[in-house]
Image: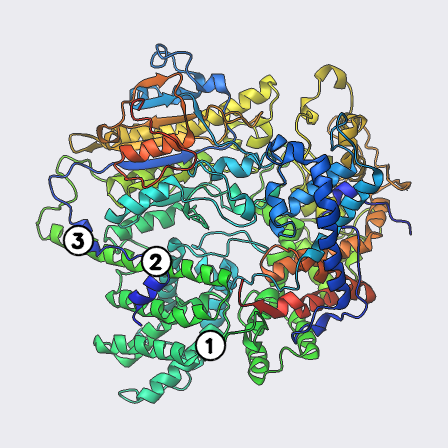
Amino acid sequence: MDRRTCLRGLGASLALPLLDVMAESKAAKPPVRLGFMYMPHGVIMNHFWPTSPETYLTSPPRNLESLKGVLEQCLLMKGIAGVNPAPFNGAPHALELSTWLTATLPNADRRNQVNIAISADQIAANSIGAFTALPSLELATMPQTHKENQEGLHEAYYSHCSYSSPTQALPAETNPRTVLNRIFQSQGQGAQPGLRRTSDPLERSMLDLVLGGAKDLRSSLGESDRHKLDEYLDSVRFLERRIAAIESRQAEAAKRAAGVTSTKRSGSDSVPIQVVIPEGDRRSDYMRVMCDLTILAFQTDTTRVSTYIGSTPNGVSYPELGFTDQHHSQTHHNNETEKVDKVSKITAFNISQFAYMIKRMHNLREGDGTLLDNCIMMWGSGLEDGNAHSRANLPFILAGRGGGSVRPGRFLTNTSGNQGDLLGTLLTCARIPLDRPIGIANKLLMDAI
Amino acid sequence: MTEFPSLPRLRAFGIALVLFPGATVLSGLAAEPASDPETAARAAAKRTYETRVVPFLKTYCSACHEDKQKGGVTFRYAKRDPGSPAFRSIWKTSLSNVESEAMPPEDEKQPTPEERKMFADWVNGLKYLSPKDPGAFVIHRLSKTEYGNTLRDLFGVDPGIASELPDEVPGAGYLNSISPVQMEQYLDIANKVLDEILTTDGKLPSQIESQLFGPVPATAKLSEESIRQSAVQLARRTFRRPPSDSEAALLVKVFRLARDNGKSDPESLLLMLKAALVSPQFLFITPIPATGNAPLPEIVPLDDDQLASRLSYFLWATMPDSTLTDLAAAGTLHQPEVLRAQVRRMLADPRSRALFDGFGAQWLGLDKLATKTFDAAKFPGMTQTLRTAMYDEARLFFADIVANNRSLTTFVDCDFSYLNETLAPLYGLEKTVTGPAMRKVRFTNENRGGILAMPGILATTSFPNRTSPVNRGVWVLEQVLGQHVPPAPANVPSLDKQDQKTVAGLTLRQRTELHRTNPVCANCHKILDPIGFGLENFDAIGRWRDADETGGTIDPTGELPGNLRFQSPGELKRIIASRSADLCRNLTEKMLAYALGRPLEGYDEIVVDQLTQTIKEDNYRMQTLISAIVGSYPFTHRRTKE
């Protein structure tokens, strides 16, 4: 049996030959990119939502002050409800992140395993990810090592929001240098200092053989073990594809060097930004470099989907803000002024990192407009209010025009919809076909957006 | 000595300790029928469920907790498969609510005390609903540390070469999966290793080459037979077991692929090596693929090679050495006396520090110490040097207990530790302990010694700027005694949210004690608080103090349920150490979960019953605990089907 037959037997589908999909026409509009950035525990509602649509642009609420200058590029929609947590009421922080991009609860019958749903970013990666060297980029500030299992839920639910299938949580990268190397490699620039030499074409064929060799092993394993092995096989398959993509980029770079015009970029586009990895461990420096990497990956079309878990729901404090209290402990504030103020400062801090990214994207030219014009960037939280664990009005900010599909610069006071509706709408704006509603979705919000 | 009664609502597992006198720990190697008391208990648990628990739920619970999901609680899912580990926490929570009479609500029909007890006994006997089963043995993927160490043993490189892999939750239940990102990193790291060790003319150092490929003839062109032999030796070394015929054939194919593309034979061997290093057989601990078409029995003992790997990664976090490999090749490793002797040998080897780095540090919470935030203004001394010294103190202390095969109670109650000049000031011993080297120190002060009084642990259980008696109490109950402390019920203000007028002028202790005037809180806090306040003489980084931040004198006296009074941390230590059975059960559960790389469930609870009995019979000795785990049924067996 050859590898392809074997893979079909495993239920995995093969990617299209890569060079065909990468050969996009020169006249194509710049692609739409999707970015997600997360903060846990919700917000202080009246510090986050504008008082009225009229005052939104002129006197934004205190949490949004860092967005001044790009509020015209942002859309706020109040009234998007999160997933009803029952029967997991005792596990609000396992749900806030895991439901954020799935709009679905974990499977109650198999709660001690990862068993939820493919997340919106991965639906996007499966579709528009085929055009880029990296289908998607998953980033995080904290290592995803939180151990807790309230309501018997698997610990991965506390620190993961991207799921490539109902049973596979995708780990996020926390080391900016690794991400930068991946972007450079994907651009066919393998000769960066500290990087390995350019890929060996034989490696791809070697991986192909290794894949084929796993099948005997598979047949003598139990069901869960087979499942693990299948994840491994998928990873090898992905790697093969990625090496092919790197080879294609290398060929393109060689053509560019020989004076042939690239099909990828237009002459008026801004040059790729310089990313400098900061020394030290200031949180803001760290978060900004992760934002920079997202920008660079979008700018260079290394990926069109990025998810950044800016902070996780466990033991995170912000010494840079002048206090060491942990985020979670402050969100149970019972309206005490000092704690409310600290939560508000933490929220403003997180939003200001997002604002940094948005402003930078707004200043980069691409096609007839800016990079931001061709993106849909979402910042948000999985809870409305950390004090009460409520989820009726999830706080989130959308930025960018999605290539003309989104009309920013507005504050909608009463959007009636849920988290699934919102995610489905964003994917539709990015021209990603949906074969079913996302989680609890029951409509699209195309009129609102 | 009297033991203070454990609160039923705090128990993680059942109180009923049913022992099987006939069961010996190392008997599980041949497939054997389940012992009779187990079968009987299983039938009884099933019967009780059908005849009594189902009607109990229907009468007292279903109106709110079936379709209505009141408070987010529903038995709808748990009833479909009551013995499933997925629902352990639901049953345990219900148990505490029913026992504490929080449920059913006051205005609803109440069960009789007899009915409440029936429900409690049934929940405590849930383990009997699980059939004898070694657990879904998810083929163990090498953790980041294990992978780095294995590369060190194979190639002599620094294990830090794997540092770019993502961090992972160590031990029980970490995400045993592999992502595309990681796969790419594995290939990168393999290339990096080769870059590092290849000689200037692109060859492997001769010793490494002969370990990997056996004797490679120095002919111009390798014969088919030489290639095959190299492939077999490479697989033995990197897969940690002999390959099946097709696995060897596959490596030969990789060699040919390179040769057909114009590579020299040495280059082709290197591509074969790269293929081995990204193969699942290297990255996971796998069984030898079954040959022939006969279906495997549902549960099989691990083969000796797989056992050697499992043992080696458990105690050393690296690949088996030649002694283990030879015993596996001879087919004798699984014999109980051989296995025990190997455990002793391995624990005496310096590589066994991996057991602390992988398990001990996580158990004691010290893995968080390096990155924990401390208020720099209040604790300027909390430098990386001090953090390292704190970690080393716990590591050497743990190693001492293992090496000298001491009783587990030594962890709590003893009079020694390991200090150097960095740590000595925290102990007030800066005059006697000098120099950077860690050395064993005996204390005359009975308040010192043991994990309850160890600076690293006292620091990790504190807030960045002050001690947390509640955190310390929870830590002792959960990490030392193995009890499960439920989160504070909703709508109860935490300490900082108390009405400021009521609490004005009260000390931290008095304020915390207000908790105990509320019956909902009192249940847990009457145990948590005395323990936490009994340790208040240690500040947030473990220094002794007589007064707290406010200047108030610290009152270290307390009383635990059962009239157990103490006047000092030293006396508190002895009370906790007297709970030897709980200590033992806790450590057994935690270490078994680590050894298996998965959370405990179902049948494991019965295994733990058996192990704790064996360990108790040998006076709770540490090496006995480790040996018992290595010889246990789930460690030595695997399931081949769901």
Q: In this figure, which residue is indicated by the disc labeled 1?
A: B237
Q: Tell me the element at label 3.
A: helix
Lower position in the chain sequence, tag 2 or tag 3: 2
Q: In this figure, which residue is indicated by the disc labeled 2?
A: A12
Q: Nearer the viewer, mark 2 or mark 1?
A: 2
Q: Residues within 10 Å of mark 3 (few under 14, many from 20)?
A: few
Q: Residue at x 74, y 32 (%)?
A: B104
In the rendered image, is residue A16 in sight? yes
Q: Tell me the element at label 1.
A: helix
Residue B454: give x, y in percent of width and height.
72, 48
Distance from disc 2 to disc 3, alpha carbons, whole Å, reads: 20 Å
Q: In this figure, which residue is indicated by the disc labeled 3?
A: A20
Distance from disc 1 to disc 3, alpha carbons, whole Å, reads: 41 Å
Q: Nearer the viewer, mark 1 or mark 3?
A: 3
Residue B616: give x, y in percent of width and height.
81, 63
User: Mark 2 vs mark 3: same chain?
Assistant: yes
Distance from disc 2 to disc 1, alpha carbons, whole Å, reads: 31 Å
Q: Residues within 10 Å of mark 2 (few under 14, many from 20)?
A: some
Q: Chain of mark 3?
A: A
Amino acid under disc 1: Arg
Disc 1 + disc 3, Cβ < 8 Å: no
A384 versus B454 height, above or below? above
